[in-house]
Image (cartoon, grey):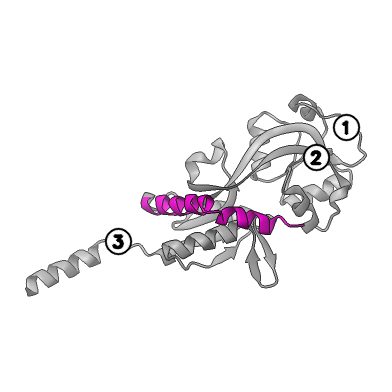
C-alpha cells in the first residue's frame, strides 16, 4: 500500500498539471467590443468571456494590455489569451481560436465632404494615403492585398485623427463599430462618411496561444455555442450596442 501511494505521488509530481487560473487574459480596447467604464472592463468580448468563464470554472481576471505588446505576448509567451481580434489568413496559424464573438462589414471611410468617389479597391489604391494601425487587422489585410499607400501609425485613434485633420484620405473601419471607435477617440462620428467601397466581412474571435490544450479550446467553443443558442449572446450584443 505504501509503495502504491509513493508511486502515485511520483506520477503526480512528474506530470504537468494545468490549472484554469494560469491563463493570462489580455483584453484590447476596441469599443464596443472592449471598453472601460469607471474602474471596470465592459463590452461584448468581456461579457462573453465572463459568461464562458462562469461555465468552465475559470476565474482569470481580464487585463487591458496595449495592442502590440498583447499581440506579441500571445505569440511568444505561454498560457496567453487575447480578445477580441479579427481572424484572417495571415494570423490563422499563430493562435487557437474560439468564436466568432462579433462580425461586421468593413468599408473605407472618408472625411465628410471630401468628395472622393471610392467605389472599388482600385479606387482606394489610387489615393495618396490610407491610415492603418501597425500590425492591426486593417494593416495586415490591406498589405496582403497589395496596397502600397498605407500610412502606418501606433493606434486606431491616430488614424481617425489624421483623417479629420486631412493628413490621410481614407480609413478602413467596421460599419457597426466605427461610431463607437471614433467617439471613444474624442471625435464626432458625423465628421466621417462611409464610401461605397467594401473590403469584405470580418469576424472578431478569442485568440489563445498555441500551447493551450485543444480540450480547453473545445470547451470554450461549446459554451459559446450554447450562449448563442439560448439567446444570452444576443442580449450581450443589444446591451453593448446601445447609443
Q: CA distance from mark 1 to mark 2?
A: 10 Å
Identify the residue shown where x is 89% and y is 42%. Answer: 112
**Please, what secondary structure does the residue beneath circle 1 have?**
loop
Residue 226 in magenta? yes
Q: Position of residue 37 (x, y in %)?
A: 70, 68
Q: Which disc number belongs to residue 125? A: none
Q: In the rendered image, which residue does mark 3 sit on?
A: 16
Residue depicted at x 30% and y 61%: 16
What residue does disc 2 label? Answer: 109
**Residue name at image x 75 percent, y 53 percent:** 181
- Residue drawn at the location 71% of the way across and 31% of the way down: 147
Depth order, front residue of 218/12? 218
Could you give the CA–CA distance between mark 2 and mark 3, rounded to whole angstroms? Answer: 50 Å
Specify the segment rendered in magenta: 215-243
**Foreground label between 2 and 3:** 2
Q: Position of residue 220 (x, y in %)?
A: 45, 54
- The picture quadrant where one finds residue 66 is bottom right
| Magenta span main SS | helix
Q: 10 Å neighbourhood of mark 2: few (<14), some, or many (≥20)?
A: many
Element under disc 2: strand
Q: Is residue 160 left or right of residue 48?
A: right
How packed mark 3 is, by other alpha carbons closer than 10 Å (few <14, some 14-19, many 20 or more), is few
First reached walking from the N terminus: tag 3 or tag 1: 3
The residue beneath circle 1 is 116
Do the residues under discs 3 and 1 have CB atoms within 8 angstroms? no
180 over 172 or under it: above or below:
below
The percent coordinates of residue 231 (x first, y second) are 56, 54
Q: Of all residues shown, which one is farthest toward the front?
A: 230
Relative to residue 5, is residue 212 depicted above or below?
above
Above or below, 127 relative to 97: above
Amino acid at each position: 500500500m505504501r509503495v502504491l501511494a509513493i508511486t502515485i505521488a511520483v506520477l503526480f509530481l512528474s506530470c504537468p498539471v494545468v490549472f484554469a487560473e494560469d491563463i493570462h487574459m489580455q483584453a484590447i480596447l476596441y469599443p464596443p467590443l472592449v471598453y472601460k467604464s469607471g474602474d471596470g472592463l465592459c463590452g461584448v468580448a468581456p461579457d462573453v468571456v465572463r459568461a464562458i468563464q462562469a461555465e468552465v470554472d475559470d476565474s482569470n481576471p481580464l487585463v487591458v494590455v496595449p495592442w502590440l505588446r498583447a499581440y506579441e505576448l500571445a505569440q511568444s509567451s505561454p498560457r496567453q489569451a487575447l480578445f477580441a481580434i479579427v481572424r484572417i489568413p495571415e494570423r490563422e496559424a499563430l493562435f487557437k481560436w474560439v468564436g466568432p464573438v462579433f462580425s461586421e462589414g468593413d468599408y473605407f471611410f472618408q472625411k465628410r465632404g471630401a468628395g472622393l468617389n471610392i467605389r472599388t479597391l482600385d479606387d482606394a489604391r489610387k489615393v495618396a494615403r490610407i491610415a492603418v494601425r501597425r500590425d492591426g487587422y486593417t494593416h495586415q489585410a490591406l498589405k496582403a492585398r497589395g496596397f502600397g499607400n498605407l500610412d502606418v501609425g501606433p493606434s486606431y485613434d491616430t488614424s481617425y485623427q489624421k483623417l479629420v485633420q486631412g493628413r490621410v484620405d481614407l480609413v478602413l473601419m467596421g460599419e457597426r463599430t466605427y461610431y463607437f471607435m471614433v467617439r471613444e477617440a474624442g471625435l464626432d462620428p458625423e465628421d466621417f462618411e462611409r464610401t461605397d467601397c467594401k473590403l469584405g466581412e470580418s469576424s472578431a474571435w478569442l485568440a489563445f496561444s498555441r500551447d493551450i490544450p485543444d480540450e480547453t479550446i473545445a470547451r470554450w467553443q461549446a459554451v459559446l455555442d450554447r450562449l448563442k443558442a439560448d439567446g444570452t449572446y444576443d442580449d450581450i450584443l443589444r446591451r453593448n450596442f446601445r447609443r
